[in-house]
Image: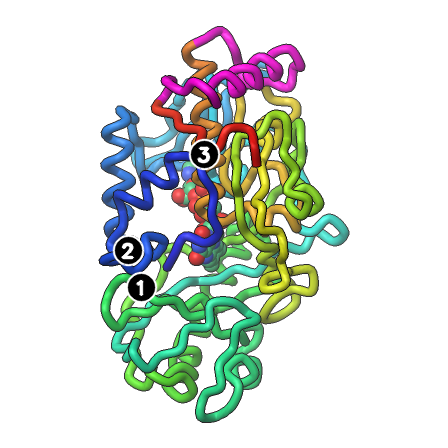
Amino acid sequence: MSHWTGDTQGGLYEEILERADDSDGRSPTLINPEKLKTVLLEMLEEAGVHLRLYTFSDDVILDGNQIRGVIGYSKAGLQGFTAKVVIDCTGDGDIAAKAGVPYVKGREDDGKMQPLTLMFKVAGVDTDRAVFPGSFEETFKVPKGDLQTLGREHLPYPAGHVLLYRSTLPGIVTCNMTNCIDVDGTNPDDLTRATIACRKQIEPIVEFLREYVPGFEHCYVISTASVIGVRETRHFQCMETLTAEDILSARVFDDWVVTKAHFNFDIHNLDGSGLDKEGVQKLFAQPKGYTIPYGCLVPVGCNGLLLAGRNISATHKANSSCRVMPICVNIGQAAGTAAAIAAKTTLIPTNWMFAIYSIHWSFKVLRFDAPFCRLNFKGGISQ
Ligand SMILES: Cc1cc2nc3c(=O)[nH]c(=O)nc-3n(C[C@H](O)[C@H](O)[C@H](O)COP(=O)(O)OP(=O)(O)OC[C@H]3O[C@@H](n4cnc5c(N)ncnc54)[C@H](O)[C@@H]3O)c2cc1C
């Protein structure tokens, strides 16, 4: 990704921004992915995390409705990893799905999910002359016409919008322009089809950039993402579900664990290119930021399991806002905190009401006195 989109406050996000900043004072939200990869590993090491890369969670270890761990699949074969609390941050909620947590996929009325994109970078851009449309609603007059109109006319359908982002490196621009619709990101055949379709779009997109976009006349591809980007899949049933109305009203939940979350409804067109009819970018008018409750992380029907990242409980529209990386980091901080509380006490994340209130109570204490787990819940309870 080119940049951290939206905003939030939680301490961990700010620490990552500060440590991974490579922008020479231009903007700490611009990402140098190679630097960020190293910083994140350093932070995990400092925190004493026992890290295991190259391992997929294949199944869950269940004891009735209590999760005891996961079965991982790697070069070493199948291995069990036990834990008092398991946090599912697989994006798609693979662990929660295996544990039998109820879910729906995509949009409530028809199950359609947001389009997929294979991100890529071009080099050789004259960034002094270049234009950078950063949203669907932003366009530029270029010598051959209106840039977004030209995109709809000349890019290979369902590609059709122009989204270009500066990087921290000279002459290098990140392109969020390939597009594949009608894909289920939990289906490997669909993922394969989408990857091939997006990859085939890259060459015509680069030809388009050279022909129509000032500054891109001599650009060339230098890298593509290692995996295709999936925006939306499963929405799980949890103790609470974040809705668009909660976001629009800047609702302050009693059990909030994420605060000052800012972002619009970034729904990419489910039937083509550009912004979906339900999406709101420039017209999004809610400057206060919103909160996310702990209940959105606690799935129904499986004790000891927490969700974090884009797979928390949210509606199709609410998910389009809380799926951005700053907010996902803050959700992860909340889930990690709850798991740490459970690990150090006799509590366990559960939908059993007494225990829920116990962890809720712990969060309220931690907000005001946070020596626990290097926590820093900035902002108190006012929003
Ligand atoms: C094309 C695209 C562009 C975007 N652009 C931006 C942007 O510019 N700025 C921004 O802030 N946000 C952007 N987003 C949104 C944001 O990147 C994601 O929504 C966010 O990263 C989700 O975070 P996550 O931790 O929930 O999931 P992910 O970041 O997807 O992390 C999930 C991790 O779990 C791993 N995993 C998956 N399944 C398993 C399994 N079964 N076992 C073990 N590991 C597993 C994956 O390999 C991955 O490392 C974009 C999204 C897409 C798709």
Task: Name the residue furthest right.
Answer: 109
Residue segment shown in magenta: 345-373
Main secondary structure of the magenta stretch:
helix
Q: Is residue 42 above or below residue 195?
A: above
Task: Name the residue furthest bottom.
Answer: 144
Q: What quarter of the picture does the N terminus occupy? A: bottom left
Residue at 41%, 73% in the rendered image: 132
* Residue corresponding to mark 1: 167
Q: Is residue 116 above or below residue 333?
A: below
Is 136 included in the stretch rendered in magenta?
Answer: no
In the image, is the residue at mark 2 within 8 Å of ligand 1 by its beta carbon?
A: no
How far, Cα to Cα, is label 2 from label 1?
7 Å
In the image, is the residue at mark 3 within 8 Å of ligand 1 by its beta carbon?
A: yes
Is 356 included in the stretch rendered in magenta?
Answer: yes
> Circle 1 — which element?
loop
In this orientation, does residue 98 appear? no
* Residue corresponding to mark 2: 32
* Residue corresponding to mark 3: 332
Q: Residues within 10 Å of mark 2 (few under 14, many from 20)?
A: some
Residue at 43%, 26% in the rendered image: 336
Contact between marks 2 and 1 (CB within 8 A): the answer is: yes
Earlier sequence position, callout 2 versus callout 3: 2
How far, Cα to Cα, is label 2 from label 3?
21 Å
> Circle 3 — which element?
helix
- Residue 329, position as x, y percentages in the image: 43, 39
Given the image, on which type of amino acid does mark 1 rest? Ser
Q: Residues within 10 Å of mark 1 (few under 14, many from 20)?
A: many
Earlier sequence position, callout 2 versus callout 1: 2
- Residue 187, position as x, y percentages in the image: 55, 50
